């Protein structure tokens, strides 16, 4: 059931952003930035956590989950440390994704040559 | 008389031209409509497939290595980033992106693709002023607006006294 839900959720997010891309003058950069802000907004009142419970891994794949995990780590740290926790805990959950993306693209840039 | 024929000729040529351009405009409008619908369907199917693969990877990791769902989610994101970066470096991810557009740009694969392609593009200009300073050229806006939005909404939630 989670497999079907994640197919539908991820597909609908991509469908909406494709419709926005085709009918307006926004570039993909604009749309990904907007989706990150939407993800952070949805987690302000823990809505995205409920989506993850129903949808499973499909909710972690779109870029909205990036905004969600930024604010989720910040608020989790803020519970124990107070207002400084928002600054120290910001990258707690997304650190794995950003660090691995940096290291992988660095190593691949050393190995491969650019095409065309 | 000659002049008269000349005018008729110009008139008919003009008329044909107008008719042609109108016809072409209608055809191109219909084509644009068709490509929009096709793009949307392809984005839905490809994006859904990426989400399906993500959930499948989580379930496989959970059942094979006996780890919790949260840890499996982190590993899944790292695996997807690795696959997307490798495909970009091998050179065929760009062709897939031009076909599927948002189906591959909106999932985390698009983030990895933008970083790897920026790094490879600026490889010629050396490690510091080349790919060192241009690595976040495309992915930087995502991180910037994510952090600003998360800080803003996090402060609102914290000041309202909500606890997770």
Image (spheres, rainbow, N blue to C red):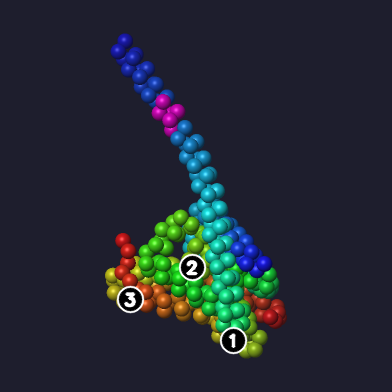
In magenta, the rendered stretch is B16-21
Q: Residue furthest front?
A: B64
Instruction: Say if residue B16 shows up in the picture.
Output: yes
Q: Which residue is mark 3?
A: A110
In depth, the one of B43 and B157 nearer the eye is B43
| Cα–Cα gap, marks 1 and 3 | 38 Å
State the residue at coordinates (30%, 13%).
Answer: B2
- In the rendering, which numbered label is found on residue B109? 2
State the residue at coordinates (68%, 80%).
Answer: B164
Q: Residue furthest bottom?
A: A81
| Cα–Cα gap, marks 2 and 3 | 20 Å
Proximity of marks 2 and 3: CB atoms separated by less than 8 Å: no
State the residue at coordinates (41%, 70%).
Answer: B86
Chain of the residue on which disc 1 is drawn: A
Q: Residues within 10 Å of mark 3 (few under 14, many from 20)?
A: few
Q: Residues within 10 Å of mark 1 (few under 14, many from 20)?
A: few
The N terminus of chain B: image quadrant: top left
């Amino acid at each position: 059931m989670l497999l079907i839900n994640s197919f539908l959720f991820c597909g609908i997010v991509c469908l909406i952003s494709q419709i926005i891309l085709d009918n307006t003058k926004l570039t993909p950069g604009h749309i990904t930035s907007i989706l990150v802000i939407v993800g952070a907004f949805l987690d302000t009142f823990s809505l995205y956590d409920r989506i993850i419970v129903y949808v499973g891994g499909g909710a972690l794949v779109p870029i909205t989950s990036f905004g969600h995990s930024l604010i989720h780590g910040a608020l989790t740290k803020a519970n124990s440390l107070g207002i400084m926790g928002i600054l120290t805990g910001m990258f707690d959950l997304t650190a794995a994704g950003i660090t691995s993306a940096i290291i992988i693209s660095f190593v691949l840039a050393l190995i491969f040559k650019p095409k065309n | 008389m000659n002049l008269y024929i000349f005018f008729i000729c110009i008139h008919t040529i003009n008329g044909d031209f107008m008719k042609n351009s109108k016809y072409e405009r209608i055809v191109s409008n219909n084509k644009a409509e068709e490509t929009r619908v096709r793009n949307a369907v392809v984005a839905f199917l490809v994006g859904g497939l990426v989400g399906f693969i993500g959930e499948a990877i989580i379930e496989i990791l959970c059942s094979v290595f006996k780890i919790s769902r949260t840890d499996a989610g982190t590993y899944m994101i790292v695996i997807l980033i690795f696959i997307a970066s490798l495909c970009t470096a091998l050179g065929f991810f760009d062709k897939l992106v031009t076909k599927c557009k948002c189906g591959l740009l909106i999932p985390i694969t698009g983030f990895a693709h933008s970083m790897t392609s920026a790094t490879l593009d600026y490889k010629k200009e050396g490690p510091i002023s080349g790919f060192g300073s241009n690595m976040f050229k495309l992915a930087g806006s995502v991180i910037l607006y994510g952090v600003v939005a998360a800080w803003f909404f996090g402060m609102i939630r914290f000041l309202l006294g909500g606890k997770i």
